[in-house]
Image (cartoon, rainbow, N blue to C red):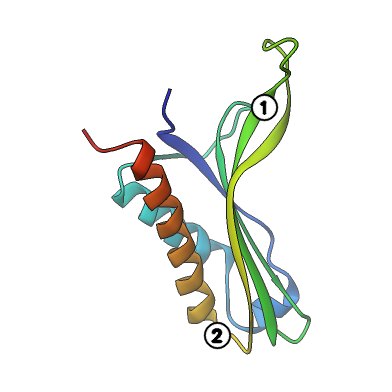
Amino acid sequence: MGLNTVKVAVETLPPGAAKLGLTEEAIQTDVELKLRLAGMRVVNTVAFDTEVLYVNVNATSDGRAVSIAVELQQGARLLRDPNIMIFTAVTWSTGSVTIYPTAQFIRDSIKEKVDIFLNAWLSVNPKK
């Protein structure tokens, strides 16, 4: 069964990111728009078996250095009993670290990472 629905989860931004003028809402909108344009369904609620595209931006308190991570998290089942789903596993990820970023640079970097994810997704879920 292919992946065609995700929930986008943007981690709460640290104060250093807010100093740069970055908002969680802007990141959420950027990511959801890219996914929808590629044909992926985006949902707002999450169940345990819902795949989550997780975005984390971590910044130093002065905003001079930032790490960005984008990862796909999926529910995992026990091999001995597939009826038991007990945890979430990261099945795809990418990230970067930069110094002296701007809010626009960070947003563009996240969008580039989502493009990398979408290219991987499209390689195994070709449009029909």
User: In this figure, which residue is indicated by the disc labeled 1?
Assistant: 76
Query: Where is the N terminus found, in terms of image quarters?
Result: top left
Q: Position of residue 74 (x, y in %)?
A: 61, 34
In the image, is residue 52 above or below residue 93? above
Q: Position of residue 43 (x, y in %)?
A: 47, 38
Query: At 78% across and 81% down in the image, what residue appears?
Result: 61
Closer to the chain start, of discs 1 and 2, is: 1
Q: Position of residue 3 (x, y in %)?
A: 44, 32
- Is residue 71 left or right of 84 when viewed as pictured? left
Spatial CA span between label 1 and label 2 = 37 Å
Q: Residues within 10 Å of mark 1 (few under 14, many from 20)?
A: some
In the image, is residue 128 above or below residue 39? above
- Residue kind at label 2, given as amino acid type: Thr
User: In this figure, which residue is indicated by the disc labeled 2?
Assistant: 102
- Residue kind at label 1, given as amino acid type: Ala
- Is residue 55 left or right of 120 when viewed as pictured? right
Given the current orientation, which residue lies at the most extreme right position? 61
Query: At 76% across and 80% down in the image, what residue appears?
Result: 60
Q: Are marks 1 and 2 in contact (CB under 8 Å)?
A: no
Q: Residues within 10 Å of mark 2 (few under 14, many from 20)?
A: some
Query: Where is the C terminus found, in terms of image quarters?
Result: top left
Q: Secondary structure at mark 2?
A: loop
Query: At 44% across and 65% down in the image, what residue appears?
Result: 111
- Is residue 7 left or right of 16 when viewed as pictured? left
In the image, is residue 36 above or below residue 17? above
Query: At 34% across and 36% down in the image, what residue appears?
Result: 125
